[in-house]
Amino acid sequence: MRIRIVDTFTDRPFTGNPAGVLVLDSETFADDDRLQRIAMELNLSETAFAHPLPPGGEADWALRWFTPTTEVDMCGHATLATAHVLHTTGTASGTVRFAARCGILTATTHPNGAITLDFPTAPLTPATAPAGLAAALGADPLSVHDTGPFIGDLLVELDDEATVRGLIPDLVTLADVSRRGVVATAAAEDPSRGYDFVSRGFFPRVGIDEDPVTGSAHTALAPFWSARFGRDELTGLQASARSGLVRTSLRGDRTLLTGDAVTVIDGELLTEL
């Protein structure tokens, strides 16, 4: 069984967010424990598993995502990685439809290699900051929003880009304040640098202290910042140590996420799936 590691939301190796991808020949997934053990072995923020579906249905591939500790409902960067593998291996072309926990997702590969994901827009709801949030982040929120059932994050607006970049959170405490994680964000200090807003994502509750680039979080960041800036087309920089750019396009109840990807490891799983 081929196993690949793909760096996403970047066009350079060893940057962006790496995801494991296993494209299965079978028509079903292995048992959950087996998939979880493989994801734990890779120890990346997510590992994606995909298998083909019968022709004529509403989707072409079934898709699931696992962190090292749990299965998740939605993942942007591992979907991007899976589409990249399907395209670069000649397994699929154009637009690919995935059936996932959060519904039908599509990924369209462009002639230049960039991939656009079509995801549901997160329903943002203003929320009261949970007790201990400011202390755990090390910064006082300007606003807090719940991001809905499929993401399960708290979106936390902070004063400025420097504050987001300088966060050193208490991850143990932070694990208790949301269903999945906390995404801190602020407007870009200098938009001429090529991005409109910055973010960082912390997900200790699902085994990821800090995610390098979180595609799914941008389905919440897009409507949040589009409302502030009055524009539907934006670019976000996730300011992790690896860093990556996500181009967002708000389309009502759908959000388009565009990014690049590069395969950095192509190997073989030496045990039966």
Image (spheres, rainbow, N blue to C red):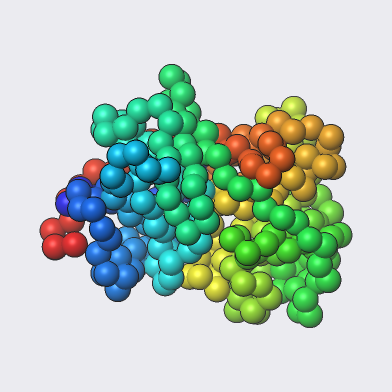
Where residue 237 sits, quadrant-wise, is top right
Q: Is residue 245 left or right of residue 155?
A: left
Q: Nearer the viewer, residue 10 or 138?
A: 10
Q: Residue 220, image x and y in percent? A: 69, 51
Q: Residue 211, image x and y in percent? A: 53, 57
Q: Which of 112 and 99 is in front in this view?
A: 99
Q: Nearer the viewer, residue 246 or 49?
A: 49
Q: Residue 21, image x and y in percent? A: 32, 49
Q: In this view, does 111 lie to the left or right of 167?
A: left
Q: Looking at the image, which residue is at 35% across and 28% down?
A: 93
Can residue 12 be seen by looking at this rendering? Answer: no
Give the farthest residue toward the front.
56
Q: Residue 85, image x and y in percent? A: 32, 38
The C terminus: image quadrant: bottom left
Q: Is residue 5 left or right of residue 227?
A: left
Q: Looking at the image, which residue is at 84% across and 54% down?
A: 159
Q: Taking 15 as reference, is 92 above or below it?
A: above
Q: In this view, does 177 lie to the left or right of 240?
A: right
Can residue 192 be seen by looking at this rendering? Answer: yes
* Total numbered circles: 0
Give the farthest residue toward the top.
111
Q: Looking at the image, which residue is at 34% across and 38% down?
A: 56
Q: Looking at the image, which residue is at 63% across and 64% down?
A: 149
Q: Taking 230 as reference, is 36 above or below it?
A: below
Where residue 176 sits, quadrant-wise, is bottom right
Where residue 195 sits, quadrant-wise, is top right
Q: Taking 251 as reference, is 41 above or below it?
A: below
